[in-house]
Image (spheres, rainbow, N blue to C red):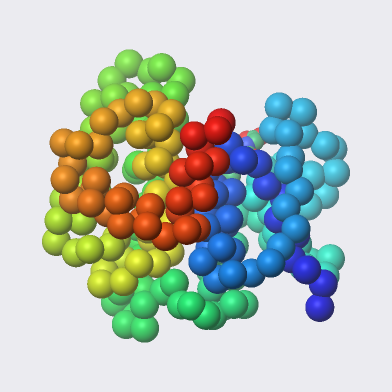
Amino acid sequence: MTMLTLYDAARCPYCARVRIVLAEKRVEYEAIEIDLSDRPAWIYEKNSTGRVPVVEEDGWVLPESAVIMEYLEERYPEPPLLAADPADRALARLWIFRHDDFTKPYYALRRGEEGALARLAEQLARLDAALAVRPWLGGAEFGLADVGYVPWVLRVRDMLGVALDPYAALSGWLERLLERPAVAAEAELVAAL
Ligand SMILES: N[C@@H](CCC(=O)N[C@@H](CS)C(=O)NCC(=O)O)C(=O)O
């Protein structure tokens, strides 16, 4: 069995999802950093959109962070990052399926669009409200839904300079996430960007 390869970019939050899952599952892998401002032509052979992340195993390639997370969950089941309960699994998948609700205002703010900060604040409040009634986005346990959002939440705080203090449950969630080495490593990486 050859080692898994991740076509990666440090600044990419979608890649961060995959890095966190791999670290949580202690999977050894080779990372190939792709320069997003000057992408090699061959990346289009791995993914027709030219985007990262892409994972490769024995010549088989898979793009799309949400699909990669699910693949890794099945390929490396321990420790599980989806709950045993089907309802909790579905809830985690719903968060990931609808991540655009959160990331659209994030990217709008990065582009400096008018009203984006207010729209992002609404989304932060929505996450905060969800986390006030359950400890993790997917329910009782840490898992893929949390991994699906934390790369952007870290960047909101550290790159866009949005204070998270007004969102007590969200801040508590992030603190608990940062106790996990996989997420702490991402925070360090974001700080160095
Ligand atoms: N839907 C994709 C999005 C991946 C994505 O947008 N990656 C960005 C970097 S963060 C990229 O490769 N951008 C280059 C481009 O859009 O051409 C996923 O979830 O993996």
The residue lying at 27 percent from left, 54 percent from top is 173
Tell me, yes or no, if residue 93 can be seen here. no
| Residue 15 percent across, percent down from the top left | 59, 49
- State ligand 1's quadrant: top right
- The quadrant of the image that shows the N terminus is bottom right
Residue lying at the far bottom of the rendered structure: 84
Image location of residue 8, percent across then percent down:
68, 47
Image position of 83 with respect to 155: above or below: below
Residue depicted at 26% across the width and 31% down the height? 163
For residue 138, which quarter of the picture? Answer: bottom left
| Position above or below: 176 against 2 | above
Q: Please identify the quarter of the rendering in which residue 82 is found.
A: bottom left
Q: Of 161 and 133, which appears nearest the observer?
A: 161
- Please indicate whether residue 58 sits to the left or right of residue 11 in the image: right
| Residue at point 84%, 38% (across, down) | 41
Quadrant position of the C terminus in the picture: top right
Q: Which is nearer the eye, 174 or 41? A: 174
Total marks drawn? 0
Query: Quarter-wise, where is residue 9 in the image?
Result: top right
Q: Whole-percent x and y of residue 120?
A: 29, 33
Any part of residue 55 in sight? yes
Q: Residue at x 20, y 37 (%)?
A: 165
